[in-house]
Image (cartoon, rainbow, N blue to C red):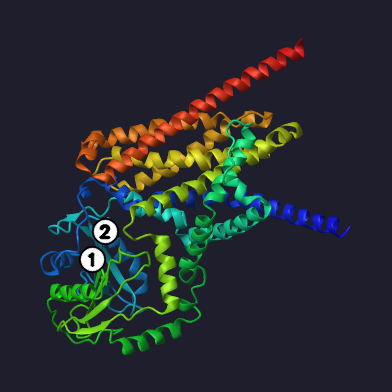
Amino acid sequence: MARTKESVVTQSFRQAMAWLHTWFGLVLGFVLMAAFFFGALSVFDREIDRWSIPATRFEPQPMPSYEKILRPAFERMQPLPAAVEAMAPRVDGPMPQRFDTVGSWSAYTTHRDPVLALFAGYVVPNAKDPDEQVWAYATIDPRDGTSLPDDRLKLGSGFFYPMHYSLTLDWKNLGFWIVGLSALAMLAALVSGVVMHRKLFRELFTFRPGKARLRSVLDLHNLTGVVALPFHFFFAFTGLLIFAATYYFPVGHTQLHDLHDRYAEIEASQTGLPHERAGVAAGLANVDAMVAEAQRRWEAGGKAGDVGFLVLMHVGDANGYVSVYRAGTDRIALVGDGIHFKASTGELIREDPAATPVAKAAEFLTGLHLQHFRHWLLRWLYVLGGLAGAVCIATGFVFFVEKRKRQHALAGSQGARIVDALAVASVAGMVIATLSILVANRLLPDDLTGRGDWERYAFWGSWVLALLHAAWRSAPVARGLPNPAWREQCWVIAALAVAAMVLNWLTTGDHLLRTLAAGYWPVAGVDLALLATAAIAAAAGRMLGRRSTARADARIREQEAAHA
């Protein structure tokens, strides 16, 4: 009797977990689908940037000389009129025509970036918050300092990557909150999924494509969920940790704002890195010599000497200092190993000490999530893990609809039809939108005003059209039949993928054979991925077409048998 009671309780608990798994996955799975898919694309965001901006198609470069390349580029920079206009309401009095007091100059690059990103912050006279600056941005060719178009949308790092963690919804940080809530739901879905599946190990080796479609879909859902379970759990958890202090619990900048400022002052006095300007003019020593000294110190410590980030604080002031940060591509942990010098003399101020155990754990978790390291095999494992998550969610959608649509058809309910249309748009429609922005990138004129906005319109517009098409074609679902939109959108994906690859050839001359022969993998890799996408989509469309024909024939035979 006791065993029976215990089994009933266990079964009831599993049923509760199944309900949680199903509905959390369904309601927020649409967001997670985008997070997984664009997270996978973001692993190679810099390579996608090279494909989308042909002017940047050259080999990655080291941090260039400050005196020869960076200083002239910095001195040319000024905030854009839009940035000045946005700053005006937070200033008492008129805005200056030119900003001469430099708060900071900084340059950033990675081992996959041929171009160099520059940032300049300028002190604004009479600003209501004295610490607030107006910013200017630039992109240059580090080989000669030539300014590159900075108004071009970087599809990889400037669009697909933000889609991964914020859906590009910047109003009130809404996108961050939606993705964060979905990550929490994903953790709950993972735990409940483990509870549901008593024979978890067996799921690793169970996939029966020859079985009934519903069975094979469930097998694929379980397989992709179990194989990448550690990956899914880790990335959902660390994603929440990375943004917790900045967006979810920003107490340091809200409730503890005064204490935060006081701590900054204490830290400045302890480290010797001034928090504010002294108001006394001072010159600038040889920055290249400071960089060379930092590299010498890293080499003495057995560390790679690539410079990833160079910062000049309080430029032209007696409190100015220069910080040189290591790229850290030789390890997973996201480290800086900063070395700081007095700007006016080049004297060493401080070398960042070894991190505490807690800080080391944070650096490792952050580095493993953001993958700035130099390890191509691990990057591809990230891609496979992200795509496995997308497949897991997509098959979950299909299983949900297929399991219920006959019941809904008999009951006259439209629920399965709605979910199916959303699933088509979330899976096939999302890929169509991604390919559409690539096609628009190659078709739009380079000198078109607001070119990046038009590319975004192509993305969102094609996604909306895919949703409308899926809803329009979903009538058969209400009768217990498949939605033909799945098959039709697969063929659209195949056509767009081929079109994007051909347009890249026609507009730049960099066809696949040429980039493969030159070994230029950023562009060749994107084109190969487009070819693979076209092949998979065409195969899927053909398979769905055959199944649709077979089902139609079977239905005709059933009707003939009924009439006979």
What residue occupies the far left of the structure in this picture?
Answer: 68
- The mark that comes first in sequence, 2 or 1, is 2
Where's residue 158, x and y in %?
Answer: 35, 54
The N terminus sits in image quarter:
bottom right
The C terminus sits in image quarter:
top right
* Image quadrant where residue 562 sits: top right
The one of 430 and 102 positioned closer to us in this rendering: 430
Residue 103 seen in the current view? no
The one of 43 and 475 positioned closer to us in this rendering: 43
**Residue at the spot of label 2:** 111
* Image quadrant where residue 353 sits: bottom left
Tell me what residue is drawn at x 66 percent, y 38 percent.
416
The one of 134 and 495 positioned closer to us in this rendering: 495
Residue 375 seen in the current view? yes
Where's residue 67, x and y in %?
Answer: 11, 69
Q: How many marks?
A: 2
Up the image or down, 321 lies above or below 375; here it is below
Where's residue 119, x and y in %?
Answer: 26, 66
Query: Is 541 displayed left or right of 329 in the figure?
Result: right
Q: Secondary structure at mark 1?
A: loop
Query: Is 427 displayed left or right of 75 in the figure?
Result: right
Amino acid type assigned to the residue bearing label 1 in the image? Asp
**Residue at the spot of label 1:** 306
The one of 188 and 434 positioned closer to us in this rendering: 188
Query: Is 523 displayed left or right of 392 in the figure?
Result: left
Amino acid type assigned to the residue bearing label 2 in the image? His
Mark 2 touching mark 1, by CB under 8 A?
Answer: yes
Tell me what residue is drawn at x 31 percent, y 86 percent.
271
